[in-house]
Amino acid sequence: MAKKVLFINQEINPYVPESEMSVLGRELPQKAQEAGFEIRTFMPKWGNINERRGQLHEVIRLSGMNLIIDDTDHPLIIKVASIPVSRIQVYFIDNDDYFTKRRMAEDEKGEEYTDNGERAIFFARGVLETVKKLRWTPDLVVCQGWMSAVVPFYMKTAYHEEPSFANSKVVVSLHDTQLKNTLSTNFKKCLEFRTATQDLLKPYNDAFDIMELGKLAIDYSDGVIEAGAQVNAELMQYARDKQCPILDYPGDNYAAAYTDFFNSIL
């Protein structure tokens, strides 16, 4: 039976402009599918995505749940589209406050959003709750970009007894450093959910920045991928010191390296 791989992507081209991450977000699921894996793919519904051009439409049966973050209800909206040519289906996590009216990490003036941490939390929980609703049980979860950095933590704590994730492995795919600022001062409090308690976050600085996010992702992952040539050397060393299974940057011809790594983790 085909192994199931869930890709939780920050960026996928053509829905957002071409970058190293967005091209990998588009191509890797396709290459994994061609290698015999069954796949599902998620990304945020960033406000700069053209819904009409991308032919996104809401999936009513999956939408409608409220996620509580920092004592506030945030409705979860799920949309779906198919990438032209490959026909790979992409699920989009949407919310009026966090995504619909906003760009990616920065606003029109180039200022990072002060609630980027909460947006990442909403995205992570939105994906995990939607996968549960789909009744789909991934063998492996691949997290790409800072937006998915809290997924491994949630999978190994708050969701570890959920049938959808009880036996899932998770790997984090590290890209070049993107966030310059620290996340909101109450990020640790916002992250609390079920058994994902603040006690577990004591090893990390209260000023949660991209380094702390990276360490959190590595600490709760079953493997680490060096997904670009400019990945933070300190984070890669942190992963090596933890003796995590690591896929070193494979360069442009990465398909076989990734699928071999996935199989080694599984």
Image (tube, rainbow, N blue to C red):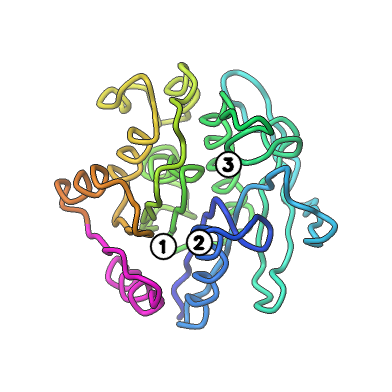
**Which label number is shown at residue 6?**
2
Direction right: furthest residue: 52
> In the rendered image, which quarter contains the C terminus?
bottom left
Report x, y in % for residue 257.
33, 75
Q: Around disc 3, counting alpha carbons within 10 Å, would you say few (fewer than 14), some (14 to 19), or many (20 or more)?
A: many
Q: Which residue is mark 3?
A: 123
Residue appearing at x 40%, y 31% in the figure: 196
Name the amino acid type tagged 1.
Leu
Residue appearing at x 41%, y 77% in the figure: 255
Height in image: 199 above or below 95? above
Q: Which residue is mark 1?
A: 140
Height in image: 166 above or below 206? below
Tag count: 3
Asked whether disc 2 touches disc 1, contact meaning CB atoms under 8 Å apart, the reply is yes
Q: Around disc 2, counting alpha carbons within 10 Å, would you say few (fewer than 14), some (14 to 19), or many (20 or more)?
A: many
**Which label number is shown at residue 247?**
none
Q: Classify mark 2: helix, strand or loop.
A: strand
Report x, y in % for residue 124.
53, 42
Q: CA distance from mark 2 to mark 1?
A: 6 Å
Magenta span of residues = 245-266
Point out the tag, 3 or 2, that comes first from the N-terminus: 2
Quadrant of the image occupied by residue 252: bottom left
Q: Around disc 1, counting alpha carbons within 10 Å, would you say few (fewer than 14), some (14 to 19), or many (20 or more)?
A: many
Quadrant of the image occupied by residue 55: bottom right
170 lies left or right of 22: left
Point out the tag, 1 or 3, that comes first from the N-terminus: 3
